Image (spheres, rainbow, N blue to C red):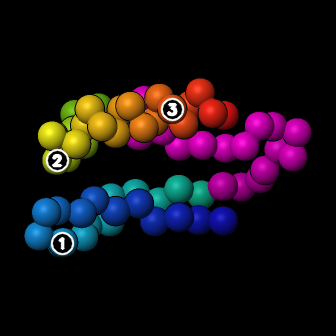
Amino acid sequence: MTYLVETVRANGHRKPCATLTLHEVDQDASRPAFDPMLNTPPGWELRPRWLTGLRERAYEGSREGR
């Protein structure tokens, strides 16, 4: 299974930046989750900045729920 990862500007312009390919799934593992607050590439910053605090709180709640 392959996913395309894109960046999106405020004006709606999308730009592909990566692909994510899953080769196999471990049926005994916990559910996979992607947390962009903990896994942001070096030098990247989530935008808009004013939303970062809200996102962090939302992902903290999601982590606790898992």
Q: Amino acid at mark 3?
A: Gly
Q: Residue at x 72, y 43 (%)?
A: 31
Q: Which residues are magenta?
A: 22-41
For marks 2 and 3, the one nearer the N-term is 2
Give neighbour class at mark 1: few <14, some 14-19, many 20+ (Cα, 10 Å).
few
For marks 2 and 1, the one nearer the N-term is 1
Q: Amino acid at mark 2?
A: Pro
Q: Between marks 2 and 1, how big is the CA–CA gap? A: 15 Å
Judge whether residue 47 is colored magenta. no
Query: Residue 63 location in percent, x, y?
Result: 56, 31
Judge whether residue 38 is colored magenta. yes
Asked if disc 2 and disc 3 are in contact, CB closer than 8 Å, the reply is: no
Q: Which residue is mark 1?
A: 13
Q: Report whether 37 appears left or right of 31.
A: left
Q: Amino acid at mark 1?
A: His
Q: Relative to 7, is 13 above or below?
A: below
Q: Secondary structure at mark 2?
A: loop
Q: Quadrant of the C terminus?
A: top right
Q: Which mark is residue 61?
A: 3
The residue furthest left is 11
Q: Quadrant of residue 18?
A: bottom left
Q: Quadrant of residue 58?
A: top left
